[in-house]
Image (cartoon, rainbow, N blue to C red):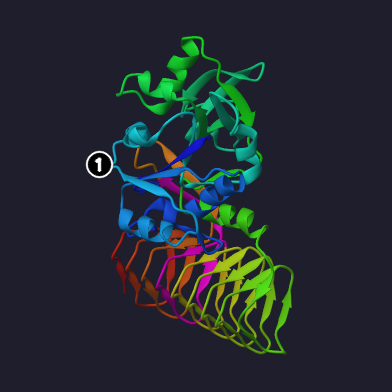
């Protein structure tokens, strides 16, 4: 019986400010932690011997895993010193062949079915920004070379970080990273089969959650558990949580998911590819589209939120607007290197803003306060106060 090891111990620095108080694997996409999709895909393939390696803010992850119907084993990585070290934390629980998966990537069950019976294989996928990953060269269906995060490459085929391995993996030097071990295996003549993934997506930066949200919302079930006015217009695949109130004149066009105990005000509009968490209040005449709105958020009336991620507990006043554009920031990992994203805004948890605030393709740190309506651009650090 194949086992699965999910690596979920990382801090997710590049996802800040969203990971300030939660591990990356617990970031919600379509109102569900990312790791939930990984576990679901394994279970749908009959894989129930699942080991999760937790680390950063592990108590939140463990609390979530305890709510699942299937029991999941958890081991703790005491220091976040890389994926290879995390895997070795699970070594004593691994009895034979196993799948290795990152807990912060979306992967579908069909992709798992393609690799689960293979020995020494990896899932690969095309990606528009291959330099952020291990770029792979394939020969006759097998791995020929893997180059970690090359500065320049014409090859768009990358490693998803999902492998089917044997316990012989642990025979290699402990200081080696996972890509290094894979390279050593190929040099020793061990063939690593490259298998194309069906649906896979990684969220390296916070704005990547918007795209991941689109992918997952395409598969939600249509369900209505709330109180819906007869004067509201709901069309497409819409999932409405228990206790949620949809006011007269509201328009909701799926795919959309709404959590529990929300209030969607009169004449507000929720457009496709929007996920709204629990206990969210959307005031009248507000428009939200293609966005991730987390729990306990308030969006004031006459606002327009598009292509944005709004963290837990934010309070955005009336006439708030997000403006999409190209975000450019210097990389925190490499000097003279830049990261790019096209989105409206990413706002960290418990941030408040005054009426008539415009968030223009910006990242706002957690627990910040915009005390006077103005245009916010670029990056605001955590705990900023804008007067």
Q: Position of residue 254 (x, y in %)?
A: 69, 68
> Toward which corner of the image does residue 313 lie, by quadrant?
bottom left
Instruction: Judge by depth and name the residue closer to the eye, 78 or 363.
Output: 78
Q: Is residue 355 above or below residue 84?
A: below
Left or right: where does residue 9 sit relative to residue 142? left
Query: According to the image, label 1 marks what residue?
Result: 79
Magenta-drawn segment? 307-329
Residue at left 33%, top 60%? 21
Residue sitting at x 50%, y 14%: 186
- Secondary structure under badge 1? loop
Q: Position of residue 307 (x, y in %)?
A: 57, 61
Residue 205, image x and y in percent?
A: 46, 49
180 in the magenta segment? no
Of 59 and 382, the residue lying toward us: 59
Relative placement, left or right, of 198 versus 371 is: right
Could you say which quadrant of the image residue 88 lies in? top left
């Amino acid at each position: 019986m194949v086992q699965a090891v999910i690596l979920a111990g990382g801090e997710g620095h590049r996802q800040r400010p969203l990971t300030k108080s939660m591990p990356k694997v617990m970031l919600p996409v379509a109102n569900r932690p990312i790791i939930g999709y990984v576990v679901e895909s394994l279970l749908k393939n009959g894989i129930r011997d699942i080991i999760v390696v937790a680390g950063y803010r592990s108590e939140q992850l463990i609390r979530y895993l305890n709510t699942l119907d299937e029991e999941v084993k958890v081991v703790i990585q005491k220091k976040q010193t890389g994926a290879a070290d995390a895997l070795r934390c699970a070594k004593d629980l691994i009895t034979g062949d196993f799948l290795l998966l990152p807990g912060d990537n979306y992967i579908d069950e069909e992709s798992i079915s393609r690799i689960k019976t293979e020995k020494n294989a990896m899932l690969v996928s095309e990606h528009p920004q291959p330099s952020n990953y291990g770029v792979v060269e394939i020969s006759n269906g097998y791995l020929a070379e893997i180059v970690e995060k090359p500065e320049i490459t014409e090859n768009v085929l990358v490693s998803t970080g999902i492998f089917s391995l044997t316990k012989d993996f642990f025979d290699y030097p402990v200081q080696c990273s996972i890509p290094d071990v894979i390279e050593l295996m190929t040099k020793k003549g061990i063939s690593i089969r490259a298998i194309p993934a069906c649906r896979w997506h990684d969220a390296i930066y916070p704005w990547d959650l918007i795209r991941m949200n689109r992918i997952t919302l395409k598969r939600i079930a249509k369900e209505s558990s709330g109180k819906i006015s007869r004067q509201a217009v709901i069309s497409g695949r819409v999932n409405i949580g228990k206790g949620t109130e949809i006011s007269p004149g509201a328009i909701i066009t799926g795919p959309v998911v709404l959590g529990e105990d929300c209030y969607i005000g009169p004449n507000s509009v929720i457009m496709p590819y929007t996920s709204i968490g629990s206990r969210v209040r959307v005031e009248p005449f507000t428009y939200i589209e293609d966005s991730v709105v987390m729990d306990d958020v308030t969006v004031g009336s006459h606002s327009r939120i598009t292509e944005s991620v709004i963290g837990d507990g934010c309070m955005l006043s009336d006439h708030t607007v997000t403006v999409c554009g190209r975000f450019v920031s210097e990389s925190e990992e490499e000097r003279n290197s830049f990261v790019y994203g096209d989105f409206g805004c990413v706002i960290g948890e418990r941030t408040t803003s005054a009426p008539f605030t415009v968030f223009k393709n910006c990242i706002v740190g957690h627990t910040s306060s915009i005390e006077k309506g103005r245009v916010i651009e670029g990056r605001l650090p955590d705990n900023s106060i804008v007067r």
